Image: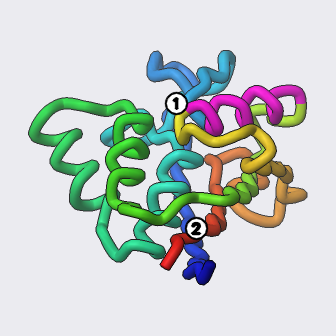
Amino acid sequence: MKQRVRTGIGQDSHRFLPVDSTKPCILAGIIFDHTPGFNANSDGDVILHAICNAITSVTGVLILGDIADDLCLKDGITDSEVYLLEAMKTLGKQEISHVAITIEGKKPKFKSRLLEMRTNIARIMNLDVTQVGVTATSGEGLTDFGCGDGVQCFVIITTQEDL
């Protein structure tokens, strides 16, 4: 059987709010305590946003800046999980075979939560956890993210469709 394989890349980044902010830090749909939330209209989940952008690069349907903005600004929905579920609807017959995620930031500490993040992303996207890879780097202080000013994320997704 013949298949069409597509690859999408997505990126997102947000700066942290001041340390006295009460907005929680949410990454991969998980709350990270002891870290301020992100300066964003939504929850600012850069991981789920980068996945949405990777889906956009496959489908051409603008999720962030269009669908998500409508959900956030018109309907008051700030949960990025909702945005990702909307993005997945745009895939049509394309099935995601793999999601590769790399996160850069000095904080929060990611290492002990990588499996939890993989598991939650797999749950949201209805994938097996083996189809989701997550890596993290501190950035060694070479960028604003490595200095602790925020978090950035890059995602590559691979989709396939039977023809």
The answer to which of 141 and 135 lies nearer the viewer is 135
Q: Find the magenta span and give its range.
A: 112-123
Number of numbered discs visible in the structure rendering: 2
Left/right of residue 75 with respect to residue 118 in the rendered view: left
Displayed quadrant of residue 56: bottom left
Q: Earlier in the sequence, mark 1 or mark 2?
A: 1
Q: Position of residue 31 (x, y in %)?
A: 60, 21
Magenta stretch encompasses residue 116 = yes
Kindly identify which residue carries mark 2. 159
For the residues labelled 1 and 2, say whether their Cβ atoms are less than 8 Å apart. Answer: no
Rendered image: mark on residue 37: 1
Q: Position of residue 57 (x, y in %)?
A: 46, 75
Q: Is residue 54 visible?
A: yes
Q: Amino acid at mark 2?
A: Thr
User: In the image, what residue occupies the spot 53% across and 72% down?
Assistant: 162
User: What is the CA distance from the residue labelled 1 to the residue labelled 2?
Assistant: 31 Å
Q: Position of residue 19 (x, y in %)?
A: 57, 25
Q: Which residue is situated farthest in the left direction here?
A: 74
Q: Is residue 27 visible?
A: no
* Secondary element at tag 1: loop
Left/right of residue 43 with respect to residue 121 in the rendered view: left
Crowding around mark 1 (Cα neighbors within 10 Å: few <14, some 14 to 19, many 20+) is many
